[in-house]
Image (cartoon, rainbow, N blue to C red):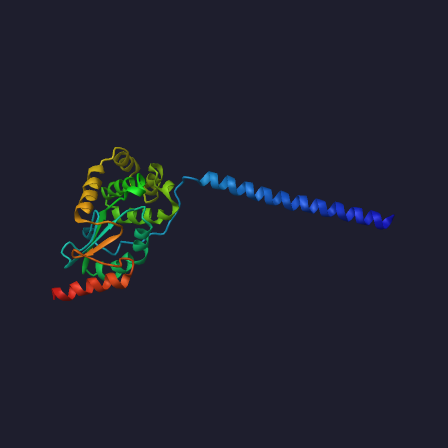
């Protein structure tokens, strides 16, 4: 009888342990859901490039660099384009460090929202121009590209406003600008200019008007810039 009682007691303790472990796992899962719901839609802290080393006079809305730089690089982009986000991550930092900071080039961002990425692409483009009204185009540009991989929901109006709040832009002015679509004509004009120029994809990167075949390769972009700098000497 004692052996049977020991076996029964062991089974009871095992069952109790299983229930406890299962209960802990269930509570952990519920806690994760609650925390996710509590933070959904709220701004989060992100690490962004620092433009403090570049003179404010070299940050003119969507143009970054010395206005008198000998070479101009244009990047025709779409904020929802993954390849454009890759250009921003892989190529632009090197351009800033090796060419823009020293006054060798100026980088112009040109809006080219693609139809398959609408309405978020055009809305984000408008939002970036609203940020430019407050002298914060480039940091906002970088923040939006960080959200590209998150999909369409990252480009809803409330999320675009969240990014402005994260970056400490004046919220009322930004929200008014975006909700009233104050820069819609600017984006439409840029889109038409891209079509007129025959651009058919993003990113399209031009160095003094000449297209770079592989814009995601920093070496290719750098070589094109160096070639132009050499010809200007």
Q: Quadrant of residue 152?
A: top left
Quarter-wise, where is residue 105 in the image?
bottom left
Q: Is residue 19 left or right of residue 197?
A: right
Residue 182 vs residue 28: left or right? left
Q: Quadrant of residue 22?
A: top right
Q: Nearer the viewer, residue 177 or 111?
A: 111
Q: Is residue 179 above or below residue 15?
A: above
In this view of the protein, which residue sits in the foreground, 212 or 154? 212
91 lies left or right of 26: left
* Residue 18 x %, y %: 68, 46
Question: Picture coordinates of residue 90 (x, y %)?
Answer: 31, 58
Query: Quarter of the image containing the C terminus?
Result: bottom left
Q: Is residue 152 above or below residue 67?
A: above
> Where is 174 relative to 225, above or below?
above
Q: Residue furthest right?
A: 1
Position of residue 214 measured from the top left corner of the image (x, y, whole percent): 27, 59
Q: Residue at x 15, y 66 (%)?
A: 230
Furthest-left residue in this view = 233
Given residues 60 and 155, the one toward you in this image is: 155
What residue do we see at 34% from left, 43% from top? 163
The image shows residue 225 at horizontal and vertical percentages of 20, 62
Count of numbered badges drawn on the protein: 0
């Amino acid at each position: 009888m004692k052996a049977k009682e020991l076996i029964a007691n062991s089974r009871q303790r095992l069952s109790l342990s299983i229930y406890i472990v299962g209960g802990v796992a269930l509570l952990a899962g519920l806690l994760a859901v609650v925390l996710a719901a509590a933070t959904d839609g709220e701004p989060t802290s992100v690490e962004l490039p620092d433009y403090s080393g570049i003179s404010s006079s070299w940050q003119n809305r969507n143009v970054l660099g010395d206005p008198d730089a000998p070479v101009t690089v244009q990047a025709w982009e779409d904020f929802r384009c993954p390849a454009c986000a890759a250009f921003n991550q892989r190529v632009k930092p090197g351009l800033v460090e090796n060419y823009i900071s020293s006054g060798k080039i100026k980088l112009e961002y040109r809006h080219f929202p693609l139809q398959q990425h609408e309405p978020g692409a055009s809305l984000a483009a408008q939002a970036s121009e609203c940020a430019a009204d407050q002298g914060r185009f480039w940091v906002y540009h970088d923040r939006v590209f960080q959200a590209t991989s998150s999909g369409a929901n990252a480009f809803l109006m409330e999320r675009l406003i969240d990014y402005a709040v994260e970056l400490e832009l004046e919220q009322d002015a930004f929200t008014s600008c975006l909700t009233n679509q104050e820069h819609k004509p600017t984006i439409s004009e840029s889109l038409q200019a891209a079509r007129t120029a025959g651009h058919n994809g993003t990113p399209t990167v031009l160095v003094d008007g000449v297209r770079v075949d592989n814009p995601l390769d920093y070496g290719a972009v750098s070589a094109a810039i160096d070639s132009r700098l050499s010809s200007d000497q």
